[in-house]
Amino acid sequence: MIRFENVSKVYARGARPALDDVSVDVERGEFVFLVGASGSGKSTFLRLVLREERPTGGRVYVAGRDLTRLSSWRVPALRRGIGMVFQDFRLLPNKSVYENVAFALQVIGRPRHVIRTTVPEVLEWVGLDGKEKRRPHELSGGEQQRVAIARAFVNRPQILLADEPTGNLDPTTSLGIMRLLDRINRTGTTVVMATHDDEIVNEMRRRVVELSTGHVVRDEADAVYGRREEILPAVGPVAVLDAPGRDVPVRRITVRPEPGDVAAERASEEAAEHLTEDIEREPVSEPLEERSSAMSGAARATEEA
Ligand SMILES: Nc1ncnc2c1ncn2[C@@H]1O[C@H](COP(=O)(O)OP(=O)(O)OP(=O)(O)O)[C@@H](O)[C@H]1O
């Protein structure tokens, strides 16, 4: 769905590249977190997918189209297939919730009867039914982000790009937003989300592409926010190893044992085999339990469903 082939982006002559020889493939239907320090190139990556910027070197393909060769008049059609969500919501302040979402369909020429049926559907889907007439300032931050997501998704794009969508939200509200993005992903939409939110990344356990000064320094499936060797096994499914009968359903919990605690690491791996499929398919079904204190060994790294 998205392919970067040796992509570089230099904004100003002589400046350090914002992206430097980046090659990444995102498959249709994937959910990918883009992580990295401020200035590492995450937003540049997203802007290249939208053809808001052009690469200085290499090629960017979206849905099989080479964006470096795409004529300008085809760019609006490209963007119609991509929804975008931002940290600061970017809603139209003088329009109602309904009008904000309807506007996205009006500008691409959807007929009025389609708008009348589609907008209430999507607003209900994101949990905003009953709030259609409110203006953005009459909503909480989480609700405003739901409007922005409804607006980005109402046209059923193939790709949803999100730049720090939980950056202005508290942890509980962020989790609700992530559930929504997860549902959108389950409809088949490819999701790429730039974030600094380590809790969210650790809970979702999806692919993580880490950028550092414009380079991809990590590309890992089912990953956590930080590098594994630094926090191993910071997040993982953990079973009661000395319980009678190991095949109890186990929930995924967060553990932070001592660095290099090999026993806990082994416990985590072993427990993964006992996880029920349902639980594995439901990565954000409920807030995870934090166990930051004194988790030093396999025997104590326990949680039963
Ligand atoms: N329009 C621009 N003109 C010149 N330089 C830019 C421009 N946009 C970004 N840069 C530079 O490119 C580099 C990467 O910036 P980018 O915004 O992609 O990083 P980021 O990882 O998204 O950062 P943040 O997490 O702070 O949003 C930075 O050094 C930044 O200063």
Image (tube, rainbow, N blue to C red):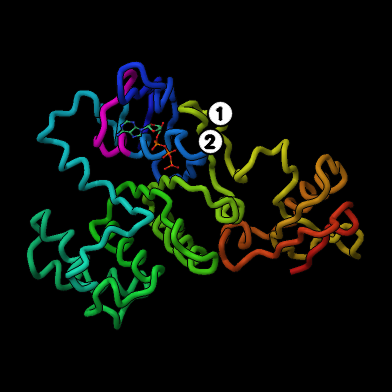
Q: Nearer the viewer, residue 268 or 259?
A: 259
Q: Which mark is residue 217?
A: 1
Q: Residue 198: x and y, percent? A: 58, 50
Q: Residue at x 52, y 64 (%)?
A: 175
Outermost residue toward the front in this view: 14
Residue 152 lies left or right of residue 239; in this view the side is: left
Q: Residue at 21% across / 72% down in the picture?
A: 98
Which contiguous range is marked in magenta? 47-59
Residue positioned 8% across, 68% down in the render: 112
Closer to the camera in the image, 215 or 236 = 215
Q: Residue furthest bottom?
A: 130
Residue 65 sits above or below residue 134 on the image: above
Q: Is residue 117 above or below residue 291?
A: below
Checking the image for residue 210, the label placed there is 2
Contact, CB < 8 Å: mark 2 with mark 1?
yes
Residue 106 lies, with reference to residue 209, above or below; the image says: below
Residue 120: image location, x then y, percent: 24, 74
